Image (spheres, rainbow, N blue to C red):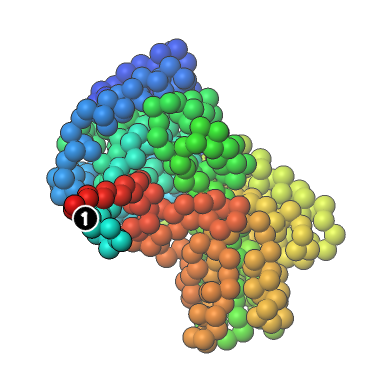
Amino acid sequence: MPGRPMVSTGRLYIDGGWREGVAGERRAVIDPSTGTIVETVVDGGEADIDVAVTAARRAFDEGPWPRMSGRERARVLIRVAELVREHADELARLETLDVGKPITLSRVVDVNTVIEQYEYYAALAQTIDGSTRSISVPALAYTRREPIGVVGAITPFNFPLILSNSKIAPALAAGNTIVHKPAEDTPLSALRMAELFSAAGVPDGVLNVVTGGAVAGQALIRHPGVDKIAFTGSTPVGRSVASLAGEFLKPATIELGGKSAQLIFADADLDTAIGAAIQGFVFNTGQFCMGGTRLLVARELFDTVVEAVAGGAAGVPVGDPFEESTIVGPLGGERHLAKVEEYIQLARATNGVRIVTGGRRLDLGGGSYYAPTVITGMPNDSRLVQEEIFGPVLTVQPFDDEDEAVALANSTPFGLAAGLHTRDVARAHRVAARLAAGIVWVNGWALLDPAMPFGGYKQSGYGRENGPEGLHEYTQVKSVIVALT
Ligand code: NAD
């Protein structure tokens, strides 16, 4: 097949080199666009986590990385950005092979974002400082921002590069060392990146990658040598990760699922709003934690918008992710497709629900393809509205006024993202303030930047990634008080 990359050695990256797994267990990595095995990797267990954490612990306790100045670390992070740029095509193709995401998306969004993450945190690495305080006794009182130690990073399948490096970049900038456990379905770019970190000058043991699933993840959280957990994944798994981290009193950032609402008011620029509505639920084949999967529309526009969004979605090119023209690739695999199908069966079985477009699997080259699907007529308490489907499925509901729009938008257990379309500046700010979500977009969707923090309200988790807030998650504050008498 043209343009498909060579894949990795399928071993673990620990202490600056490749290793076989201790138990010899392996796991297949499947190309979701064909259903074929492209690679096998180590199915890591407790013993592998122990070897990796020991290396990371030594690198933190005895190695140069935490002791280097922020400026020295920044030079290495800039070199990481340069190496990612030099290997952009290779990394993009690896991500597309592994996840099934369209190659243009891998190139323009995933790889470019990683470059920006390292450029951004290289700058912030040079700004990590404390402050002096006035206190009531004669003393020099100041704070220091110090690294936390060994970070255990556990990441999901849908944006492997971006969500791994949204943890690794700030953790490195702050002087921590890391054991990364990528998602079992999509570990390939993490293994390739491990070599690039070493080539950039990240010292041995500072960044270690152990592939595997829940067993490796749990071992990482429990390991006494790990000081902090950084997790992104589903809400049910996040709940058990948070409770295990809590049992061991480890600080954790927990980034979870979403069911984000996009509101179209009657005064909106309709072309922009309809484009954003389609983009909001087909982007990354709907496997986007911040997907705009609930569309709320002013009642007078409802029929017009439903027709335009469904028509547009039906025309989106679905197919081989290695084709430049493809906008929607396969879902991440059969497991993910089965979940989407279960929700569509529920839609068919629910009185009053209309599947306006889609609602079916697409038979394309043996891959896990699903047609972009638009649904109307479900009650607000339906599982179709309240639960994360994690596929290209949009529910559309009408509202009568601003209060009802906000109430519907805030009516799920999630609170990751929200958006609104209006030409009224006062309404834009008023509604943005009332939406219970970690990020709000006005007249656009999925506008993201390493400088802007994101994270959950409610069941979408806690902690923030990106921005100075994302850096502070990897530091702890020490107060020093020097008596002057
Ligand atoms: P998942 O929860 O199934 O897995 C996430 C990671 O946790 C994987 O590495 C997995 O191996 C590991 N894991 C599984 N069980 C574990 C356990 N018991 N202990 C420790 N680790 C365990 O999620 P997924 O299917 O890979 O990703 C999709 C989900 O992630 C969606 O719900 C999506 O909304 C969410 N997500 C959230 C964000 C965000 O920033 N909030 C971003 C992307 C994805």
Residue 276, horizontal then vertical, whole percent: 51, 69
**In the rendered view, does 141 fall on the left or right side of 33?**
left
Residue 15, horizontal then vertical, whole percent: 27, 24
Could one spot residue 5 in this view of the protein? no
Residue at (67% x, 52% y) in the render:
387
Mark 1 crowdedness (10 Å alpha carbons): few <14, some 14-19, many ≥20: some
Residue at (60% x, 41% y) in the render:
239
Q: Quadrant of residue 451?
A: bottom left
Specify the amino acid type for callout 1: Leu
Kind of element beneath mark 1 = strand
Nearer to the camera, 424 or 124: 124
Residue 457, horizontal then vertical, whole percent: 56, 58
**In the rendered view, does 34 fall on the left or right side of 407?**
left
Image: 425 above or below 97: below
Could you tell me which quadrant the N terminus lies in? Answer: top left
Q: Which residue is denoted by mark 1 in the rendering? A: 140
Nearer to the camera, 30 or 462: 462
